[in-house]
Amino acid sequence: MSHQLIYLVFGIVLTAALVFDLGLVSKRNKLITIKAALWQTLFWVILALGFFVFLLIEETQQTALQYLSAYLMEWSLSIDNIFVFVLIFTSFKIKKQYYSRVLLVGVLMAIVFRIIFITVGVELVERFSWILYIFGVFLLITGYKMFIEKEEKEFKPEENKVYKFLNKILPLTSSDGNGQYIVKTNGKKQYTVLFVVVIMLATIDLVFALDSIPAVMGISQDSLVIYTSNIFAVLGLRSLFFLLRGAVNQFEYLQQGIAVVLIIIGLKMLSEHWINEWFSKNVQVIGSLVVILLCIGSSMLLSVIKKK
C-alpha cells in the first residue's frame, strides 16, 4: 500500500477516534475520574498498537517496528510533559472541571505545531544529511543534562517568556471566564487565563518536541513513522495526564531512564556509518526497541521499588 493510502486510513481512523472521544467520552466541563482516564488511555494505546499491526500487514516489518519504537519513545517522553502540565494548571489555579477541554485544545494546537516542525526537520535532513550529526550531538548533550539534573525547576508563570509575550500584546484577565477563552468587559475584549494556559501547553509541548523529534529521527527518517508516532503519542497525552497527574512525580528514576535512551540514540546517530557496516537495518530497529523498553521499564520499576 502506498504512503498516501496509509495516510488516508490514518486520517479516517484519527477523525473517527476524536469524534468518539469528544462525543461519547469527554463531556464539557466534566471532571475526569481515574477510571475514565484509564479507559481513555487504553483506548488510545490500543488504537496506536492497532496501527502498528496495520503497518505490519501493509508495510514492511522494519517500518512497523520503527513506528512502535518511535511511539514508545514519544509516549515515555510525554510522561515528562505531564509533570510540567500539572505545574502550569497549579500555577494558574485552573479549576479541575476545565482541565479536559483546555488540554484538548492545547493538544490539538501542539499537533499542528509538531506537524510544521516535523515537516521542516524532514525537509532539512533530506537536503542536508549532515544535520543528523548535529541532532546526535544535541541528544547527547540533552541526555547528559537530563541525567545529572536532580530537581525540577520551580515553574513561575510571571517569569515565563510565552506569558510575558502574551501579556505585552494581548489584554489579559486573571478570570477563567466561566470556561470561556475570550470575554468582554465594559465592551472590551479580554483573554482569560484559560486562553493563556492553552497557548502555554502548546508552546511548551513544542519545546519538548525539540528533544523528542530528533530522537525519533534517530530511530527512523521515514516521515510516515515520524508523523504517526508523534500524533498518536500526543493525542494520548490528555488521558494520560488524568491517569498519572497524582503519581507522575513518583517515578523518580524515569528522567534518568529517558536520558540514557537519548544518549544511546545520539551515539547511534553519530556512528551510523559504522553501525550500518556491522548490523542490518532490522537488527538496528529491534535493538532500538529493546533499549527503549529496557531503559524506560527498568527506570519505572526501580522508582516503584524505592517508593515501596
Image (cartoon, helix red, strand yellow):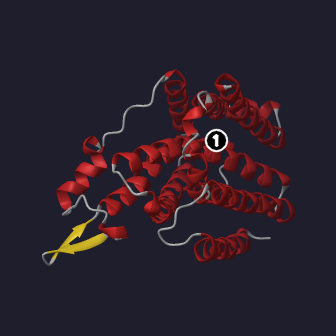
Q: Give percent across and percent down for residue 264.
A: 66, 29
Q: Give percent across and percent down for residue 134.
A: 51, 36
The structure residue drawn at horizontal position 63% and vertical position 75%, both measured from the top left corner, is 24
Residue 254 drawn above or below residue 86: above
Q: Name the residue under label 1.
A: 218
The answer to whether residue 62 is visible is: yes
Of residue 58 and residue 249, the one placed in the foreground of this image is: 249
Residue 225 drawn above or below residue 305: below
Q: Quadrant of the N terminus?
A: bottom right
Is residue 300 rendered to the left or right of residue 119? Answer: right
Q: Give percent across and percent down for residue 300.
A: 68, 32
Q: Furthest-right residue in view?
A: 57
Residue 182 drawn above or below residue 31: below
Q: Quadrant of the C terminus?
A: top right
Q: Furthest-left residue in view?
A: 186
Label 1 CA crowd tier, 10 Å (few <14, some 14–19, many 20+): many
Q: What residue type is labelled 1?
A: Gly
Q: Give percent across and percent down for residue 222.
A: 67, 55
Helix, strand or loop at mark 1: helix
The structure residue drawn at horizontal position 63% and vertical position 42%, both measured from the top left corner, is 76
Give the total of numbered labels. 1
Q: Quadrant of residue 32?
A: bottom right
The answer to whether residue 106 is visible is: no
The structure residue drawn at horizontal position 72% and vertical position 57%, both measured from the top left corner, is 42
Q: In which quarter of the image is residue 299?
A: top right
Is residue 39 rendered to the left or right of residue 199? Answer: right
Residue 234 drawn above or below residue 213: below
Of residue 49 and residue 142, the one placed in the foreground of this image is: 49
